[in-house]
Image (tube, rainbow, N blue to C red):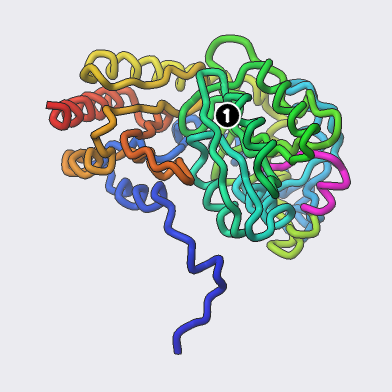
């Protein structure tokens, strides 16, 4: 007989990024599609060493079940790091370890969203966040952005005139997909609106430590006076994504709710992985490692921008982010990036069309480029090809 699926499953669609990544498994494909870190920077030898030490010193503990909240020394380290970097005031009890930031987003849906509730987000926004929240039957309201973040007047208009707004979801540092960064003024204003209208803010921050130049800004959470802001962070972009170790941070009582729903999902994250990461942080200098990442990504970003400036025709615009992993490209309005992608696949080149990053207003003349994963020769070749293909559509 036919399975009787839940309504939320019937409305789900495969992630466009994941489907494109299947194509990029072919090593001949030059891929700008995923948000993949540079694998040559993974500290393989160091991880081998800390794995040995953890097993020798605490093998039985590392291989056993542990608490849902996560390994306490690691949570203490995360809290201290956030307090120093983001002007927060957390302790270990403010932190829940999650299987990647993606699990934190899914748990957010379980904790806050009923069917018909509203999620307010940037336009465009992170594709996998749309997928995570949509599974709980929410409705999205998009807020246009300028170069410094959400347009605050539009946000307040939505908050004033929309019922059942539960969450404002943002990525204020080197946003995925655009690479834009919010100003300090807009961060402060958002915290004020969250308090005024009683709405939770999810401040997603996977890229904040990857700033190549310019001033870092305080987190939205640092302006939060009423416990309305929750923050996510991850080791995926500054260490190794394969560990799938990330976190969500916020008010103690709210985090307890997250702990309860996580217990129903997977009980806990990998004990050994958490202890491996913590031992690495004790043994090696994570800041030196992050500087290596930033140096490489800065070089690749600069090359990508140079090639686009040289190869792209008039009528095409793109962002020039001061950090992170992504560039955002806007084509003339009558060009569909999905059609451009078809031509590029024929030439063994892949990227992510931008339409899927808009939950409501499908702007198909946009696309996202990841510059962190491909070596310099492939960045040059791939973006030159992309420029040639775009010219075919314009001419």
* Magenta-drawn stretch contains 257: yes
Judged left or right of residue 226, residue 189 is left
Query: Residue 337: x and y, percent?
Result: 28, 38
State the residue at coordinates (37%, 38%): 363
Residue 196: image quadrant is top right
Most distant residue in the bottom direction: 1
Question: Is residue 38 found inside the magenta-colored segment of the image?
Answer: no
Q: Residues within 10 Å of mark 1 (few under 14, many from 20)?
A: many
Q: Would you place residue 255 above or below residue 321 in this image?
A: below
Magenta segment: 246-258
Q: Residue at x 53, y 15 (%)?
A: 212
Residue 234 seen in the current view: no
Q: Quadrant of residue 134?
A: bottom right
Q: Residue at x 54, y 38 (%)?
A: 142
318 lies above or below 49: above
> In the picture shown, does residue 326 fall above or below 357?
above
Name the residue that disc number 1 marks: 207
SS at badge 1 = loop
- Number of numbered markers: 1
């Amino acid at each position: 007989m036919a399975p009787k699926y839940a309504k939320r499953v019937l409305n789900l669609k495969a992630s466009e990024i994941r489907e494109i990544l299947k194509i990029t498994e072919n090593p001949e494909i030059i891929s700008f599609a995923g948000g993949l870190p540079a694998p040559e920077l993974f500290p393989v030898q160091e991880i081998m060493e800390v794995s040995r030490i953890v097993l020798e010193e605490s093998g039985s503990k590392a291989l056993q079940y542990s608490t849902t909240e996560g390994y306490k020394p690691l949570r203490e380290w995360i809290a201290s790091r956030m307090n120093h970097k983001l002007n927060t005031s957390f302790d270990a009890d403010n932190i829940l370890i999650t299987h990647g930031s993606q699990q934190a987003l899914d748990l957010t849906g379980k904790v806050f969203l009923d069917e018909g509730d509203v999620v307010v987000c940037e336009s465009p926004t992170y594709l996998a966040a749309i997928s995570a929240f949509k599974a709980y039957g929410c409705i999205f309201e998009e807020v246009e952005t300028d170069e410094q973040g959400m347009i605050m007047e539009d946000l307040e208009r939505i908050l004033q005139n929309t019922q059942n707004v539960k969450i404002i979801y943002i990525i204020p540092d080197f946003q995925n997909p655009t690479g834009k960064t919010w100003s300090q003024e807009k961060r402060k204003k958002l915290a004020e609106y969250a308090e005024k209208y009683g709405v939770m803010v999810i401040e997603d921050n996977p890229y904040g430590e990857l700033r190549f130049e310019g001033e870092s800004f305080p987190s939205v959470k640092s302006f939060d006076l009423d416990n309305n802001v929750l923050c996510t962070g991850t080791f995926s972009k500054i260490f190794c994504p394969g560990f799938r170790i990330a976190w969500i941070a916020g008010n103690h009582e709210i985090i307890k709710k997250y702990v309860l729903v996580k217990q129903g999902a997977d009980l806990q994250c990998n004990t050994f992985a958490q202890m491996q990461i913590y031992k690495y942080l004790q043994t090696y200098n994570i800041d030196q490692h992050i500087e290596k990442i930033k140096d490489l990504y800065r070089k690749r970003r600069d090359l990508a921008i140079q090639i686009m400036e040289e190869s792209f025709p008039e009528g095409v615009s793109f962002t020039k982010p001061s950090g992170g992993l992504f560039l955002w490209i806007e084509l003339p309005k009558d060009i569909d990036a999905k059609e451009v992608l078809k031509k590029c696949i024929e030439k063994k080149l892949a990227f992510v069309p931008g339409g899927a990053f808009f939950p409501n207003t499908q702007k198909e003349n946009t696309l996202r480029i990841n510059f962190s994963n491909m070596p310099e020769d492939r960045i040059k070749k791939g973006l030159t090809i992309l420029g040639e293909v775009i010219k075919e559509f314009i001419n």
